[in-house]
Structure formats: C-alpha cells, structure tokens
Image (spheres, coloured by chain):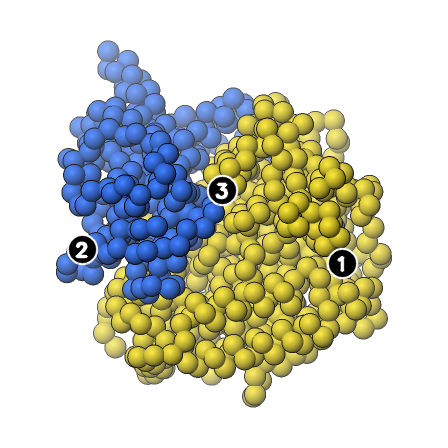
Chain colours: A blue, B yellow
C-alpha cells in the first residue's frame, strides 16, 4: 500500500512516497507510525489519544480534513470513502489523489510548521475571543444548578466539539477570509449562548462581518466533524435571533 | 543566560490535564505567577479520554435516599484491598460533593435526572449509584471546562515543551529544563514545581492509555531523590476494545451490559455471584482472562460485552461515545451486536510518593493526579475515583505549593549547568550515526511488561522479566536517532520518553517480584492469598548509589477494620 505524504522542513516542501504493509483495522495514524518507526524517523505529525477524542491528528487525507486515528486505510484504498465536501480552493493545491494510494497532507488554512504539523495559534485565538467560560450570576455555594435534560441534550451537540480544527480546514470561507472566526469558535459561542446557566450577552461577540455573517452555509464543517457537531445550525439560529432583535 | 530561554515564575505546573489545570487554577487564585508546561496542548491530555464519570456522595438518585461520604470512603478502602491510606481517602470522599458542584458551576454540562439534578449511575465496587457523568464523555467535558477556566490570560502556557530534568539547590527543587519541541531548543524555568504528568500505561503493549502516557513525571522525580510508591499495582481494565485496546467504559456494565463467553454464558456468576458484571475491575479482568485461558474465549482472544438488550434509545442516550468507538474501531454496532473486549492496562495506582498535601519528599516538589500516589487507590482503583482525585488533590497541590513559594535569589549557574547537561544527552542521541532505534527497544519492553507483569504474575516469570528489562536498559546506551532535525524531532522525544519508561518498568518489576502475595490488581499464581502480616504496607523505590533500591512504609489504617474482600 502506498502513502504519499507531504513534507516540509521550514524551507522547502515536497512529497515522499512510502510503501507500508497493510494490516486489518489499520488507521492512517497507524500507517504514519509505521513510517516513523521503520522507514523515516524525521516524519512529524501530532498524536495523542489514537481514539478520536483528543483532536490532535486532524489532517487532510485524500483531500478531506479528518482525524488520522479514525480513518481506516482500507476504506480509502478501496474507494469506500464517503465524505463528500463542497469545493474549497485550498484543495486545488498540492498533489492529486492516485487510485489505490493514500494522500496525506497538513490541514489547510493554517500555516504549516513541519510536515503534517500546522500552527493552530489562530484557531485558538478565535476560540479565546469567544470568551468560552461560563458566566453565571448567582451561584449558591454547595448547590448545583438544576438543568432540564432536554436542554442538556441540545447543549451536548456543541459540547462534543474536540477542537481538532478539521472544520476550519474544510471551510471555504476560512480559505478566502483569514479573519473569519470559523465554525468551531462560533459553535463554542453558541454553546454558551444556549446554556441556561449563563447570564451574559453572548451573540453580539460575533455580530460582525467576520463572525456570524461570514458563513455561506457550505456545511462542510458538519460533514467533516468527527463528533457530528453542527456549527452551521448554530450559526443559522444565531443569525435569526439577531435579525429578530434588529427587526 | 539569554532572556528568551530563561523563564521565571512562582509556580511551574508540568502537565496540562485535569490535575495540572486544577492545580494551576488554584495557584492563580492564590495570587501566584503560574506557568503550565506541557508536551502537548492541554486539551490533548489523556484526561480527555475518561468516559464513565466522577464519584461523589450526592445521593441524587430518585428513590434511593441519602448517600454518605463515609460509605464512599468504605467502598474505596475495601476496593483498594486495604492498601489505600485511610486518612487520604477521607479527604477524597469528604471533598467529593463540593468538587463536583464546583465543576458544575464552572460550566460542565453533566447529564441530568428528570428532576434536573446531576445524574448518577452505579459503578463497580460501589454500594450506591454514586458516579456523576456527562454521557460517556465525562473526562472530555471536565477537561474542556477547566481549560476554559484557565485561559483568562494571566496563566502562561508553554505548550509542546518536553521537560528533560528538574533542578535542585541545597535539597530543594527550584525549577526545570524543558525542550521546546517547535524550535528544538532547551529552556530553563524557575519556580516551585508541581508534577501532573499522568500515568505510565504505555510501558505495556495492550493499554487504553493515550500514546503520550509514558510516565515522564515519575522519572523526573525519581532522578532528584523522590520515592516511587506502590508501582507494582497496575490496573487492567476488563473491557478494552479487541484490537486497539480503546477503553469501553465500566458505565456500559453500569447501564446493564452483560459479559458473555463463547458459550453465550454470563460467566461472572462463577466469580462474583452477587456483584456479577459490577464486581471491581481486578476481579472482572481476572475472570475474563481465566475464561479465555480455559478455552471459553472467542478466537482465543476476547469475550463479548453485550448491550443489545439495553435497546437503541438507552444506548444512544447514555453510551453514544461507546457506540461510536465500537463502530469506528471495530466495525460493530452495539445496538445490533456484542462488542469484542479483552483486559488491557488502564491505570497506574502507584506513582510519586506524596503526603496528603501533595508534597514529595523533595522540598519544593509536588505531584498530583495519576503520576502521584497519595495513596487513595491502594491496590485497586474504583471506577469514578480517578477523575475525582484529579480535582480534589489538584486543588490541594495548587494551594499547598502556593503557600511554600518564597522569593529566594536565583542561582543562575545551576540552570546553565543543567541546560548543558541535557544538551549533551540530546547530542549523544542525535549525534550517533548508528546504533539501535528506540522503536526496537520499546516494542520489546511493552511485550515484556504484558507477558511478565500482566494480569497473572508468577515469581520465576517475573524474575526473567526483570532481567529482560535490565538488559533493555543496557541496550538503551546504544540508542540513536537518524533525524537531526531541530523542529519537532519526535523520534528524539520518543527516545527520551523511552529512557523514562525503562526506569519505571524496572520499579514496577522490582515491586512485583518482592511482593509475595496477591492483593488487588497484583495477582500471583504462586501466592494466591493476601498476606497482611507481611505485606499490608507500601512499596517505595528510590534512587540508590547503584540503582533503584526498595523499602517498605506503613499504611494509614485509622478508620476501617481490615477484612476479607467479598463481592
């Protein structure tokens, strides 16, 4: 099985091809480890949990941003890969997918540091800008807030986000407008907006042309999300609320 | 020393998981200048993977009446096979309700009962439904909450810095040296150190742990004279996914899941007739291994965790993460088919010896969370108690370390010497043109640990294992890295991690060989009984003149009488 991997050392970039023996259940992350341990120990990529919960290993695999640890090599090689996303200019860059091979590249829309590692500072800067911490008014020490299980269920759609930045790499708007805060940051803001315990005014934080109003509803964010978070729905709801308030 | 590579703070927290962040928040609240140094971005820490929940005697379950922290303490002590220090367990259980409520106030979205209160589920070894949860993603929710609380701007984060050594001056720990992974340069940090580096599960080949759990903190502490306590007690989680060993939460059994062998039998009836699938982890893990060893496993490798009778709705609501894991990593939908599971290394009960204020026996050095041993888990940890430990003792560590901070004059030459020493070490690994690759030694180490120090242990096999570990340590002298890249040289990091793991493996092995009894997770086929008169005591391994030396220390037993464990 052939893996074609993007390489960058800070000066120049190129692609390396590696022949990796196939094993049942093998993920793209497993294959990258095989390369690092047996073929070329200079290959760099982020990893931690290998179980799709920590968000370290989002990268562009066969032109789809996704977690390397959750992507089975077999489905890629056999063409059963089902994620269909809308076109994004960043995907025209770089090499093309070859039949029977796996193409591994760094996540688009963020500067590459080395090989498959990107600089996520901007992504987290937008996250912090949303002031993502609960702001309550009157907590009673020693007593929990009571919450309706239905409210919890809606909140879970958004708290499930693991901040892997796959959505940021898949969003065509982020590809064109470097100031767009992106799906993850907006979904996080919406999560605090709908938290019944939170008493601060939230939606205005992104009520500008690079916030809620920049989204063009390509819905790539939801399609590539490993946790099925729907930022597009959050953005739509936030917009209608703001429109109602204005009108 | 250049300013760019010398960082002065009051508190240095090494590790950005739950313990580290909780300690940092507390130190910041005490008005200290706090820095978090972590080899990964804090949100990538292993805490994020904790699934099942966090214990607290809230007594929220409708119709079940009140729960009491003393009952929680009893279950914890009994579960620990009486090796936990009972005064430490008191602190853990007494502070549990306020710790959970604090997390709720900080923003954690816990699952709720219909009446709006935090939901609680039954967990193994507990006499009451005491485990609070956020679906089956409790660790993820808690870690994100604490990270949110810590990014106000006053806390300094050094993400992707790997600590290579601690610095001691006149017997006190005064800082550390760390490698900036992005640039490949060594930096010096001054301040009181709190280690919160997590467990060391990756010394085993079958482990639920994140790949980054390599026991770095325990190694660092050992090197400057701190003791390592009860290292031989390794928890094997009964249900890890066959193949990848990703955790399948105990919550799946808490919600009513069955364990079945190849004959379709609920075999737990032969091992723990009352508690059945909810017996403590050590007992269930041995039961599964016995079924497999006696030919009632499936493909001679695993058993089935059957959730199909719980129904689609309950599985989707309570165990959505488990369903996703089973589908993604084993191609099995638990609504329709049983999940293939086998025991795997899960938790390190032992760790850096600390007192109830989280201080090690090196002044100026604190440790908390899985890297430490207070000891609240003894010989076997109950599910739901590790998340609890991270927040209760993380807070204590942050508070106690802050009280000790003093504005002593820095001796800069110590830091310069330490950088030089670590720089030489790195050059010696990267500079070699040939030798042995870390991956070769690591593979051998992991196999040795599971074969010789696994679920079932035996004297002679363990002696062989200890010899193998020592030979691997010798081999490490010839280790080399081909790549001389400065930026993100992961082969170098993995080699340095391997150095840490080899020492830890040796400490585990020494403790296990010497402990001639069975207690909790340490089960010996040549000594199948618990032997309180000789071994109701803690193992402590320390750096001696010629290598690690072993001694014993007493257990605090001031609350409950020591009894047999029956479930």
Q: Given the image, what chain letter belongs to the residue carrying mark 1?
A: B
Tag 3 near tag 1, CB within 8 Å: no
Question: Between residues A71 and B562, which one lies in front from this camera angle?
Answer: A71
What element does badge 2 sit on? strand
Cα distance in 3D space between marks 3 and 1: 34 Å
Q: Quadrant of residue A235?
A: top left
Report if residue A188 is visible in the image.
no
Question: Between residues B484 and A150, which one lies in front from this camera angle?
Answer: B484
Please give the residue where the numbered disc 2 appears in the rendered image: A14
Q: Is residue B121 left or right of residue A60?
A: right
In the picture shown, does residue B517 fall above or below A56? below
Q: Dot 3: within a 10 Å radius of its alpha carbon, few (fewer than 14), some, or many (20 or more) residues? A: many
- Circle on res. B81: 1
**Labels 2 and 3 within one chain:** no
Mark 3 or mark 1: whose residue is earlier in sequence: 1
> Looking at the picture, how far across and down is residue B80, in whole percent?
72, 57
Name the residue at 64% across, 29% down: B308
Residue positioned most to the bottom: B545
Q: Given the image, what chain letter belongs to the residue carrying mark 3?
A: B
> Looking at the picture, how far across and down is residue A136, in whole percent?
44, 33
- Circle on res. B329: 3
């Amino acid at each position: 099985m052939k893996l074609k991997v993007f390489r960058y050392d800070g000066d120049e970039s190129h692609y390396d091809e590696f022949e990796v023996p196939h094993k049942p259940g093998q993920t793209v992350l497993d294959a990258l480890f095989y390369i690092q341990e047996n073929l070329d120990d200079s290959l760099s990529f982020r990893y931690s949990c290998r179980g799709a919960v920590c968000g370290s290993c989002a990268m562009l695999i066969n032109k789809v941003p996704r977690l390397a640890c959750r992507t089975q090599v077999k489905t890629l090689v056999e063409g059963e890969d089902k994620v269909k996303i809308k076109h994004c200019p960043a995907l025209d860059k770089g090499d093309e997918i070859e039949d029977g091979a796996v193409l591994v590249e760094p996540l688009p829309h963020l500067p590459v540091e080395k090989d498959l590692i990107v600089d996520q500072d901007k992504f987290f800067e937008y996250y912090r800008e949303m002031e993502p911490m609960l702001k309550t008014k009157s907590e009673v020490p020693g007593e929990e807030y009571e919450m309706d299980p239905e409210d919890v269920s809606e909140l879970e759609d958004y708290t499930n986000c693991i901040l892997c930045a796959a959505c940021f790499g898949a969003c065509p708007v982020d590809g064109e407008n470097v100031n767009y805060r992106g799906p993850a940051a907006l979904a996080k803001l919406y999560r605090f907006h709908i938290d019944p315990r939170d008493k601060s005014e939230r939606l205005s934080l992104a009520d500008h042309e690079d916030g809620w109003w920049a989204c063009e509803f390509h819905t790539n964010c939801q399609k590539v999300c490993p946790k099925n978070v729907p930022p597009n729905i959050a953005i739509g709801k936030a917009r209608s609320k703001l429109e109602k308030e204005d009108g | 020393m250049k300013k760019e590579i010398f960082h002065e703070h009051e508190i240095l927290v090494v590790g950005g998981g739950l313990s580290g962040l909780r300690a940092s928040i507390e130190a910041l609240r005490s008005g200290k200048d706090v820095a978090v140094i972590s080899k990964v971005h804090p949100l990538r820490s292993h805490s994020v993977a904790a699934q099942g929940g966090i214990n607290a005697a809230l007594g929220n379950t409708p119709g079940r009446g009140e729960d009491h922290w003393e009952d929680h303490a009893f279950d914890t002590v009994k579960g620990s096979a009486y090796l936990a220090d009972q005064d430490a367990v008191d602190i853990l259980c007494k502070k549990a309700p306020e710790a959970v409520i604090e997390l709720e106030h900080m923003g954690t979205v816990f699952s709720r009962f219909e009446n709006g209160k935090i939901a609680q589920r039954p967990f193994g070894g507990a006499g009451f439904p005491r485990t609070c949860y956020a679906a089956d993603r409790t660790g993820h929710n808690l870690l994100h909450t604490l990270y949110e609380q810590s990014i106000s701007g006053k806390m300094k984060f050094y993400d992707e810095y790997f600590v290579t050594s601690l610095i001691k001056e006149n017997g006190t720990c005064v800082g550390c040296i760390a490698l900036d992974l992005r640039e490949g340069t060594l930096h010096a940090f001054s301040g009181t150190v709190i280690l919160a580096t997590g467990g060391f599960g990756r010394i085993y080949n079958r482990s639920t742990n994140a790949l980054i759990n390599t026991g770095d903190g325990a190694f660092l502490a050992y090197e400057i004279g701190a003791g390592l306590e009860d290292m031989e007690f390794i928890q094997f989680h009964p249900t890890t996914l066959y193949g990848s060993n990703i955790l399948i939460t105990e919550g799946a059994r808490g919600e009513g899941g069955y364990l079945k062998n190849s004959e379709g039998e609920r075999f737990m009836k032969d091992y723990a007739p009352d508690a059945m699938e909810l017996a403590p982890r050590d007992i269930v893990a041995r039961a599964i291994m016995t079924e497999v060893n006696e030919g009632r496993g499936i493909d001679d490798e695993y058993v089935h965790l059957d959730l199909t009778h719980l129904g689609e709705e309950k599985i989707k609501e309570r165990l959505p993460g488990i369903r996703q894991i089973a589908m993604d990593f084993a191609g099995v939908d638990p609504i329709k088919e049983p999940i293939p599971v086998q025991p795997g290394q899960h938790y390190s009960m032992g760790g850096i010896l600390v007192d109830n204020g989280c201080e090690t026996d090196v002044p100026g050095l604190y440790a908390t969370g899985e890297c430490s041993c207070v000891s609240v888990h003894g010989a076997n940890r109950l599910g739901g108690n590790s998340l609890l430990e991270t927040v209760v003792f993380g807070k204590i560590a942050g508070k106690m370390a802050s009280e000790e901070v003093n504005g002593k004059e820095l001796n800069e030459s110590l830091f310069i010497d330490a950088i030089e020493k670590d720089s030489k070490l790195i050059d010696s690994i990267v500079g070699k043109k040939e030798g042995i690759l870390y991956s070769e030694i690591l593979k051998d180490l992991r196999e040795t640990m599971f074969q010789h120090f696994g679920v079932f242990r035996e004297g002679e096999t363990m002696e062989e294992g200890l010899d193998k570990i020592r030979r691997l340590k010798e081999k490490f002298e010839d280790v080399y890295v081909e790549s001389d890249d400065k930026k993100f040289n992961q082969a170098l990091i993995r080699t340095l991690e391997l150095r840490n793991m080899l020492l830890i493996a040796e400490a585990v092995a020494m403790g296990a060989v010497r402990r001639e009894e069975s207690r909790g997770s340490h089960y010996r086929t040549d000594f199948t009984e618990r032997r309180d008169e000789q071994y109701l005591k803690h193992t402590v391994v320390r750096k001696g003149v010629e290598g690690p030396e072993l001694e014993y220390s007493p257990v605090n037993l001031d609350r409950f009488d020591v009894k047999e464990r029956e479930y």
